[in-house]
Amino acid sequence: MSQLDLRQLQQTVHSLRDELEKSAANTEREVQKERAKSSDEIQQLKNATQAVRDSLEEHKHEANELLQHAQMTLENENRQLRATASALRDELEREKQSSIRAIDEVEQEFSKEKRSLQEQIQKLRDQLEVKA
C-alpha cells in the first residue's frame, strides 16, 4: 500500500470518525430535545391533572354548599308546613267546638220550644176536657 493510499485511508477514517461524532452529537441533541419535550409534556400533564383536581374539589365544595342550602330550605319549608298544619288543626278544632256550641244552642232552643209547645198542647187538652 502506498503512502497515498494510507493517507486517503486515514482521511477516510478521520472523516468517518468526524461524521460518527457529528451523528452521535446530533443523536444526543435529538435525545435531549425529546427528553425536554417529554419532560415538558409530563409537567403539562401534571399541571392539567392538578387543575382538574382543584376544579373537582371546588365543584365538590360548591355541591356540598348547594346541598346544605337545599337541606336548610327544605327544613324551613317543613317547619313552616308543620306550623301551618298545626294552626289549621287548631282552627279546625275551634270551628268544631264553635259548631258543637251552636248545635247545643239550637238543640236547647228546640227543646225549649218543644216543651213550650207540649205545655200549650197540654193546656189546650185540659181546656177541651174542662169544656167536655
Image (tube, rainbow, N blue to C red):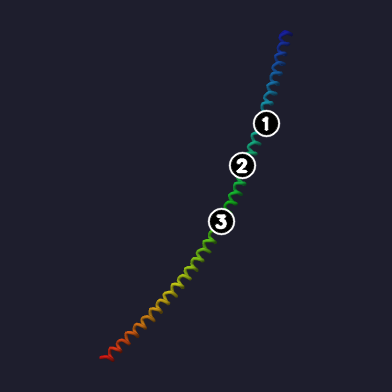
Q: Position of residue 22 (x, y in %)?
A: 70, 21
Quarter holding residue 14: top right
Q: Position of residue 71 (x, y in %)?
A: 56, 56
Count of picture labels: 3
Q: Which residue is found at the position 63% from the left and 41% from the top?
A: 51
Decide which of tag 1 and tag 3 comes sooner along the chain: 1
Please tell me which residue lies in front, 99 or 20.
99
Amino acid type, callout 3:
Thr
Q: Answer above or below: position of 119 versus 50.
A: below
| Residue indicated by mark 2 | 52
| Residue indicated by mark 3 | 73
Q: Which residue is found at the position 64% from the left and 34% from the top?
A: 41
Residue positioned most to the left: 132
Q: In whole angstroms, how far apart are the C-alphas of marks 2 and 1?
A: 24 Å
Q: Which residue is found at the position 46% from the left and 72% from the top?
A: 98
Left or right, 89 with reference to 40: left
Amino acid type, callout 1:
Ala
Q: In whole angstroms, how far apart are the C-alphas of marks 1 and 3?
A: 54 Å
Left or right, 53 with reference to 113: right
| Residue indicated by mark 1 | 36
Decide which of tag 3 and tag 2 comes sooner along the chain: 2
Q: Nearer the viewer, mark 2 or mark 1?
A: 2
Question: If the image is split into quadrants, where does the N terminus sit?
Answer: top right
Please tell me which residue lies in front, 37 or 110.
110
